[in-house]
Structure formats: C-alpha cells, structure tokens
C-alpha cells in the first residue's frame, strides 16, 4: 500500500475543516486515493482552511485521524492553506501587474441591483454574475474603497475540457460568472485562487473531487492560463445525496462517519463509486488492495 510511486502522477484530497468527514466527503477521498494508487502515483492531503470563519477547531486533526483509520495514508505531511497567504498574494500581484486583475468596490446588493436592472435574475444556487462595474475601462472604483479583487474574464469562446467521468464539458465564464473574486471583501483569499496556486505548488497532475465542484473547473483553468500554470486532468465523482435529494454535506446535517467497522464504511463509499462488492478477510488493507484493480477496470480505460 505504500509502495514506491512508479509514475509522475500526483493526486490530492483537499477537505475543508468545517467538521469531520461524512459519507459524501469519504467518496471523494476514496476516489482520489484509489486513482493515485491505481496510477502508481503520489497521494497528498491538503487542508483547505483558508475560509477561517467556517473552520471548526480540531476538525482538521479529526479528518486526518479518520483517514488514517480508513487506511488512506498520504505520501507527505498535509499542506495547510492558512499558512500560505504570501503565495496567494504573490499570485495576485502578478495578475495585477499584468492587468489581468483589478480592485472592486461593489457589494452583493449592488451587484444584484445591477443585474436586476439588466433583467437578470439568479437561479437557485447560482452565483451573481458580475457586470464589470469596477473594471478600469468602466471608470474603476469611482473614488470608492476597494473591497475585493477580481480576475478580468475575457469575453472569448467558452472554456472547454474533458472530464474523465462526465465527458466533454464547456462553460462561458464571462456569461455564467463574470469577473470572479480572487480576494474577498473580508480580506480572505477566494477558493479559486488558493486551489490553483496550491495545485501547481504541489505538482498535482490529476484532480479527483466531487461533482458539485465541476462548475469551478472553467474558472480555475482561466486562472491557470493567466498565471502560466499547468492544467491537471479532472475527474468529478458522483454525489451522495440526502433523503430530500440535496447533496449530503456538513451544512445539511450529515453525520460524521461511523468508524466502528471501517471496512463497512469503505464498502459503502465504494458502492457509491460504482465498485463491485469486494471480498476480503475483513481488514481495511485487504479491502483496499482489492479496490485498486476494480478502480483500474472502471476508470483507467483510455479517455
């Protein structure tokens, strides 16, 4: 299980420490671990604690303990985003110097009002499309105080990519999102910038994560291009849903993983990933050893 990597593959699992792992987050963790092991590569863990108000004290250490209990051992100590502010600032400075980012003074209410004036109404769970109010060519801040910093999204052809599970994907970021935030009004770094900088810093070649994050991919690809960084391959895993059809999440009241029988817990995650029932001797190690070739059959066919 800890054999020497045979390839340049680097994968990662990047939980936010807003609570312990639950059934939905384990599906993403297991998929990313299996993909790394099936490729003979490295598997890393990154604690995405950049959104400090949402982080729960002790949750990061609890997540690491849960992973260990399930036999999902990382190949290096975890990287913590809360310790990497200087790297995110350096990336923002590069974008500002190149004219690819700019300060913004708009509040959410002002953005919503501007969209309403254009006849745009956000759909449920959709983001507010930024109308470019503070772009330099539109007059910039108009003597207002900068609250956030945004990426200048080009009005170009849609960003297209291939997802290893979902197939061909496309998003016109300028119309779906607009100029998106890199540093928030509260001074915290936005997820999009942090994840792009950290994936490059950790030499991540393959991102395996939940399907709910698929619509972030186009924005991250634009940032990768703007910063001259490589684009990983992507595989977005199925979501585990609650009884009402909503994604199972900590915010939705998902209970922590039951680790009284880790093999049963792993098997449930494997079922969610479409793996067959796997025989074993009841040990975590035996189950994982059988899961790796099952994952190879399901996901390592030519794209």
Image: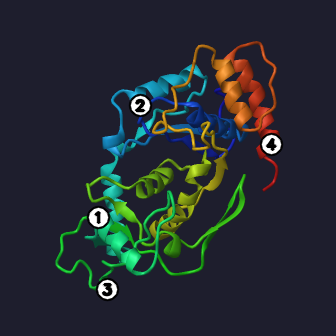
What residue is pinned by disc 4? 298
Between disc 3 and disc 1, whose residue precedes? Answer: 3
Using a 10 Å C-alpha cutoff, classify the residue at mark 4 as few (fewer than 14 neighbours), some (14 to 19) or many (20 or more). few
What residue is pinned by disc 1? 148
Q: Using the numbered discs, state the Cα–Cα distance from disc 4 to disc 1 in whole angstroms.
A: 43 Å
Using a 10 Å C-alpha cutoff, classify the residue at mark 1 as few (fewer than 14 neighbours), some (14 to 19) or many (20 or more). many
Give the x, y percent position of residue 190: 38, 56
Circle 4 SS class:
helix
Against 301, is 160 above or below?
A: below
- Is the C-beta separation of discs 3 and 1 under 8 Å? no
Between disc 4 and disc 3, whose residue precedes? Answer: 3
Between disc 1 and disc 2, whose residue precedes? Answer: 2
- Residue 197: assigned label: none
What residue is pinned by disc 3? 138
What residue is pinned by disc 2? 60
Depth check, front residue: 43 or 159:
159
Against 269, is 117 above or below?
A: below
Against 21, is 35 above or below?
A: below
Question: Image quarter for residue 91?
Answer: bottom left
Q: What residue sits 29% from the left and 64% below the top?
A: 148
């Amino acid at each position: 299980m800890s054999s020497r990597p045979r390839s340049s593959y680097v994968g990662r699992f990047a939980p936010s420490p807003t609570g312990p792992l639950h059934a939905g987050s384990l599906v993403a963790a297991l998929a990313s671990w299996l993909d790394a092991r099936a490729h003979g590569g490295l598997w890393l863990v990154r604690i995405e604690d950049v959104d400090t108000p949402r982080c729960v004290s002790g949750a990061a250490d609890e997540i690491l303990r849960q992973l260990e209990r399930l036999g999902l051992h990382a190949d290096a100590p975890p990287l913590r985003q809360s310790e990497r502010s200087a790297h995110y600032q350096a990336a923002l400075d590069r974008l500002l110097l190149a004219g690819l980012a700019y300060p913004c003074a708009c509040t959410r209410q002002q953005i919503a009002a501007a969209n309403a004036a254009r006849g745009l109404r956000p759909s449920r769970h959709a983001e507010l499309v930024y109308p470019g109010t503070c772009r330099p060519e539109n007059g910039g801040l108009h003597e207002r105080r900068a609250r956030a910093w945004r990426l200048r999204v080009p009005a170009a052809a849609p960003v297209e990519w291939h997802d290893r599970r979902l197939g061909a994907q496309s998003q016109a970021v300028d119309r779906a999102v607009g100029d998106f935030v890199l540093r928030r009004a509260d001074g915290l770094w936005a997820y999009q910038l942090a994840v792009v900088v950290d994936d490059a810093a950790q030499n991540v070649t393959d991102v395996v994560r939940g399907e709910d994050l698929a619509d972030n991919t186009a924005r991250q690809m634009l940032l990768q291009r703007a910063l001259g960084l490589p684009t990983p391959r992507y595989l977005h895993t199925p979501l585990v849903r609650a009884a009402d059809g909503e994604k199972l999440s900590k915010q939705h009241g998902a209970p922590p993983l039951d680790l009284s029988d880790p093999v049963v817990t792993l098997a449930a995650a494997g079922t969610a990933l479409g793996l067959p029932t796997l025989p074993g001797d009841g040990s975590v190690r035996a189950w994982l050893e059988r899961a790796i070739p099952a994952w190879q059959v399901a996901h390592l066919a030519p794209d």
